[in-house]
Image (tube, grey):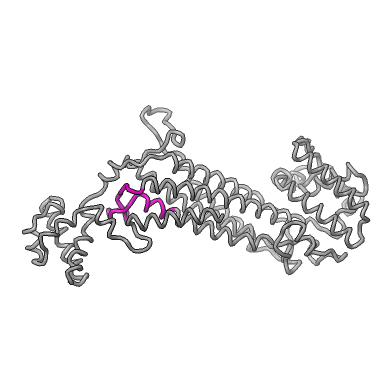
Amino acid sequence: MIIQPVSGARGGLFGAGGRFKGGTDPIMEKFNESIGFDKRMWAQDLRGSIAYAKATAKVGILTAEESASIISGLEQVYAEWAEGTFEIKAGDEDIHTANERRLTELIGPLGGKLHTGRSRNDQVATDTRLWIVEAEKDILKDLATLLEASAEFAETHIDVLMAGYTHLQPAQPIRFSHWLMSHMSAIMRDAERLQQLIPRANQCPLGAGALAGNAFGVDREFLANELGFDGVTSNSLDSVCDRDFVAEFLMWHSLLLVHLSQMAEDLIINNMLKCVDMDDAYATGSSLMPQKKNPDALELLRGKSGIALGRSVGLMATLKGLPRAYNKDLQEDKVPLFDAVDTVKDCLAIATGVIVTMKPNPKMLMKALCPEMLATDLADYLVRKGVPFRETHHISGACVRLAEESEVSIDTLTLEQLQNIDSRFEEDVLNVWDYEVSVERKSSIGGTAKARVMEQIEKCKAFAKTL
């Protein structure tokens, strides 16, 4: 693709001699154009034009020969883009004018018939919907890869135990795989939400015209079928200014990146504690300190979530004051949308790479466990003997306090010391201090017992196959 310098003259499609007497201020030319970023939609724009040429032929605006000539020209333009030889010229304000200008160069004045009854308002809405649906379907495949890889990794390390935390304080022992699947549960919800966005985005606005509809009676359902849409939009004014599908995607991507950020933060902490070792491929060094191995991939995953939130809020602020119908403000949806898609795809690839290459350290993960995490198990011991939990909670708390005051670990308290607190403790209470037993007792659906974690892993694998 070749880009020529922009001049102050208007492009041929909107040149002097029509509504305008003279050229545009060169600064305005640059300020107004969107070709620098909306050229990403070149394929969608050409697909829409080919379908529209067929639709206008159906209603007699084009003859069969004219339609075939236009479609052939559009296919030549498509080939130029695909081969990287398309030349962007001065006056190509956006992808629509660039493609139409080139079509006219190839087939002559007949190219000017293509836009009959069509506006760039419904054209850009069509292009953007086609582009975002393709992107969303592609992202679903990336999500499937992350889920499948994580499930396999979790299964490989199913027997590794680790400390579970609430408030960043030691809470209860869990399986390392249970922790990983907790993050994949959030990613599965993200995938479900993304699937739900697609039907709303995949509606055809082409044929809505500038705002009032198409004056030549083009068959909008035919256009929808040609382009692979699920249906047509129901109101022409709304069709050209609706950007809900962009806003929804930006909100969706901000939540996905929040979830990836949470996982990254967990791994950053565990990496600091030497419980998990990050592969060199996803770490960097220090320009000063030779010993440093920084988890930069994780820190960037965490950092990009803030930018994602900004994109979402920014577009909503742009939309909130817009009157019906189309306004040029809507051009500003493209950059955050394209950036969001690129960021999501990069983050999913990085997250997948980090997970499949990281190495949990079972020894250090076990070292992070402490007997105090079994205080609830101590309370449960008495519950199983018929003591009300509120009472056993108080009794176990007294045992924790005794151990702290004695400056010993709770699991070293003797049976006599425990019985001095409550006489219902018996000799088998000493079996409570077993992390594996504790983990296996959490056997309800979704729990950290091995069988239950395996269920979660299999569910994750099965879900990934549906994406």
24 lies left or right of 330: right
Judge whether 367 appears above or below 198 on screen: above
Q: Quadrant of residue 84?
A: top right
Q: Position of residue 124 (x, y in %)?
A: 74, 55
- Per the rendered image, the range of residues in magenta is 158-183
Q: Quadrant of the C terminus?
A: bottom right
Residue at point 91%, 59% (across, down): 61
Q: Position of residue 211 (x, y in %)?
A: 78, 64
Count of marks placed on residues: 0
Nearest to the observer: residue 226 or residue 84: 226
**Is 176 included in the stretch rendered in magenta?**
yes
Q: Position of residue 17 (x, y in %)?
A: 92, 50
Q: Quadrant of the N terminus?
A: top right
Nearest to the observer: residue 459 or residue 161: 459
Residue at point 93%, 52% (across, down): 65
**Is 164 included in the stretch rendered in magenta?**
yes
Judge whether 363 appears above or below 228 on screen: above
Nearest to the observer: residue 339 or residue 187: 187
Q: Position of residue 389 (x, y in %)?
A: 22, 70
